[in-house]
Amino acid sequence: MPSSPRLPTPKFEAHWPAALIWLCAWALLWHLDGELNLGNLALLLVLASAIAGLWLSAWVSVLCSALSVLMFNWFFVAPRYTFSVHLHQDQLLLLTMMGVSAVVSYVMARLRVLADLESRHAQASEQLRELGEQLRERLDVAAQGRYLQSVLAQHSGCAVSMLITDEDASRGLWVGESEASDAQGLWACVQQFGALGPGTGRYENQATLFLPLRGRTRAFGAVAFHGTASQVLPSGLRENLQQICDVFGLELERAQTLRLAQQAKDEAQSHRLRNTLLTSISHDYRTPLANLMGAASAIHDQASRLSTDKITGLAQTVLDEAQHLNRMTTNTLQLARLDAMPLQIKKDWESVQEILGSVLAKARQRYPLRRFEVAVPEGLPLIQCDAILLVQLFDNLIENAIKYSPDDTPIDIQVQAKNHALEVRVMDQGMGIDDAWKDKVFQVFERVHADAAQADATDETQLRRGMGVGLAVCKAIAKVHGAQIWVQDREPHGAVICLSFPVAPQPDVMLEA
Amino acid sequence: MALKVLLVEDDRDLRQTLRDALSVEGYEVIASGSAADANAVLRHSMTSDSPLDLLVLDLGLPDGDGGDLMRRVRAQYALPILIISARHDDANKVDLLDAGADDYLVKPFSISELLARMRVTLRHRGTVVQAPQTQYNCGALEIDLAKHTVRKAGEPVHLTPTEFKLLARLVRQAGQVVTHRQLLVDVWGAEHVDQTHYLRLYMGQLRAKLEVNPTEPTLLLTEPGVGYRLAE
């Protein structure tokens, strides 16, 4: 914003072209004198007067024309070197000349005024645009308010205080010194959505001018200009100040709209999460619950008629389903927790080898007949992570690999240190994952072959239910560790889930020999 | 005479189930559903002729923090304490282990897991007054803390002083979890209590020397987020 409160005057316009025109015209007149008759020479003067009018103001132009007519009369009109005129011959000619030059000058002057106005407007709107940009650069409302306060104080030469209201216009943020009476005026100005004080037609007896910060729908605050009664605000200055206030009002409105949109987005997000949990419970919990119920009630109701083997089998079902439910619950809760507060995890230096080891020990216990082929090199770097989350991550990946591949195929687990990264791969020899599903598997409740599982509930597909949340949790856990997770194909068939953890500079430890 | 166990668990059904299961195994079980009740039982029983042998304590009690109860017991009696925690990432559990609880279990658990933990905890009963364990034999590994020797399949294994201290600390509580904090304080000193990376690296070295497959250890077990446990 330039510091001058008034718009600068348009630049000086040169008068020399007009003088040049007149000089040429007179030179031509002398030259043609005697060759052409008086009427034709006079037309030359009319032309000169019209063209010179382009550069001169109306009065100067008419004055020049009059002077020319007099000189013409003196030098060319017979009787020469007198001012006497043959009324019938020349008077009309002279009048025409004066009229034309006056009209041309007036029209030109009008045009200049309009152009001037336009450039003032353009400049003013450029200033306002710049003001808007400056406001947007300041991120918090208080800083914006302070900036606008300084701009307004500079423009008006008054002490300025400001009230910025919040969403429901109940509480306000104060900028600058304001007395109790100001506060009242500022609130009134916000509520009435219009200017108050001297020169506004409302509350004329006030010593302070109040202007609202207008948005499209309501005022987002108000500004008080102190001591405006003793000073007379130059014409147009109040409009200018109001325009500046409106820029801020619109900016506040824009910020509010953005905030509301973000809020709506957050709400939609939490809504989605709630739906996720509900879907999880209604969709994935019913089957294991039904199995539990069936097995437990069979033991309860028919124990006397069942063989010991049968009862042991039913009890095993109860155990398996309970474990399954436990895993799903843990996953679902973890997903909700990570979604709600992803930053509240406790990282420590951990060894991926150790964590994998403890996960593998449990997996071998659960699936004693399954083969696991594990390749972990020595001397891997430590990573910064939450061990319990990583246990859950690896556990889900291994469980997934087991569920989606035939029982007689091994699960391969490989760890490799790369440049500033640690890569973990969990590989199965199952059906693999179609390209179309490679990203979707990490979304909640997307499940490969889900339709097949429902249509044909054979033993094999039965095993595969309930991993809807599993990979989504893996992705969420990877994300809070800054790790990448993705799916690759395995030759000849099968899926590889790859994880890449960032490796920070290692802590110093003096190891003994 | 049967071993006497005080079981503090607020869920009535789980309390009943555990009580029955423990009774079948030959324990004499006193069950209690609140901290207040447990306090009364403790006061009465610990001064009687047949004091309690073990406290199994659930952390989420309705009338107070199980942790307060545990700290009081730890301060007054030499009674082994087994903690039952509802969540894996419950920081409270680690605090209580640091504060002297003997071991922990995370819900849901199987009866066999509970019995295994109870057996280990009972075996270490009285570590406060009796000499702690100084010999350890498991699989191919023989450790004698008094003689300062470690043998793997009969062959002596050379350990650095810190490695030996770390191993010795685990041997004294073989079968029980030892928290990161306890290990760091006892092996490196209180000023190193935050330097878990020491543990990771030295444990890695110990495993490389003592385990057949360091990635899938059978002796030096990891309890993620809590500490380490030497298998029995």
Image (spheres, coloured by chain):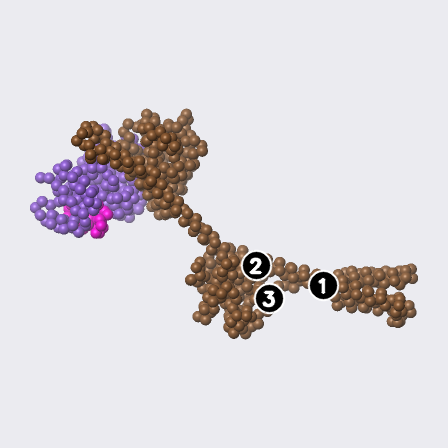
Chain colours: A brown, B purple
Q: Secondary structure at mark 3?
A: loop
Q: Residue at x 28, y 27 (%)?
A: A369
Q: Position of residue A428 (x, y in %)?
A: 37, 29
Q: Position of residue A271 (x, y in %)?
A: 39, 46
Q: Position of residue A487 (x, y in %)?
A: 41, 34
Give the residue number, with chain letter if any, for mark 2.
Answer: A128
Q: Could you tell whether B147 is left or right of A232 in the image?
A: left
- Magenta region includes residue B60: yes
Q: Secondary structure at mark 2?
A: helix
**Which three-letter amino acid code belongs to the residue tagged 1?**
Ala
Whether discs 3 and 2 lie on one chain: the answer is: yes
- Magenta region includes residue B18: no
**Which three-letter amino acid code belongs to the residue tagged 3?**
Gly
Q: Could you tell whether A492 is left or right of B122 in the image?
A: right
The answer to which image quadrant residue B128 occupies is top left
**Which three-letter amino acid code belongs to the residue tagged 2?**
Leu
* Sooner in the amino-acid sequence: mark 1 or mark 3: 1
Q: Report the mark closest to the observer, 2 or 1.
A: 1
The answer to which image quadrant residue A16 occupies is bottom right
- Residues rendered magenta in the picture: B55-79
The chain holding disc 3 is A
Quadrant of image for the C terminus of chain A: top left
Give the residue number, with chain letter if any, for mark 1.
Answer: A109
Q: Residue at x 45, y 33 (%)?
A: A436
* Sooner in the amino-acid sequence: mark 2 or mark 1: 1
Q: Position of residue A315 (x, y in %)?
A: 22, 33
